[in-house]
Image (cartoon, rainbow, N blue to C red):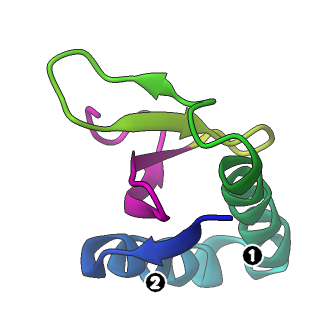
Amino acid sequence: MRTILFRKEAEADLRSIIAYYEDVAPEAIPNILSDIYRSIDQLVRYPHSGMRVTGRPFRRIVTIKYHFKLAYEVGEDRIVILGVFRYQDREA
């Protein structure tokens, strides 16, 4: 089984998501994090399930409920989460 690692940027993305929702809808935070971690759990089981990003060395997956986009790289023994962001915010 592959280990999940977060780049510093991905950790910062998660902190930003939490900070934003603390102001606008704090009750949604547990559901949002659950949605994100459900997609990460999927990657542990099926690491190549995300779409390849044309011209980039990584893949992406979109969470089911809140449509956050996770950019990630698959290694032999690990999956590195590169970024976590709202689907419409950044190109990846």
Q: Amino acid at mark 2?
A: Arg
Q: Which residue is mark 2?
A: 15
Find residue 4 and name its label.
Answer: none
Residue at image coords 31%, 23%: 53
Question: What is the three-letter code of the residue carrying label 1?
Answer: Ile
At x 77%, y 37%, the residue is 64
- Dividing the picture into quadrants, the one containing residue 10 is bottom left
Tag 1, which secondary structure? helix
Which of the labelled discs sits on residue 29, or is there none?
1
The overriding secondary structure of the stretch rendered in magenta is strand
Reply above or below: 45 against 19: above
Residue at 68% from the left image edge and 64% from the top image edge? 1
Magenta stretch: includes residue 84: yes
Q: CA distance from mark 2 to mark 1?
A: 11 Å
The answer to whether residue 44 is left or right of residue 20 is right
Compared across the picture, whether 77 is left or right of 89 comes to right
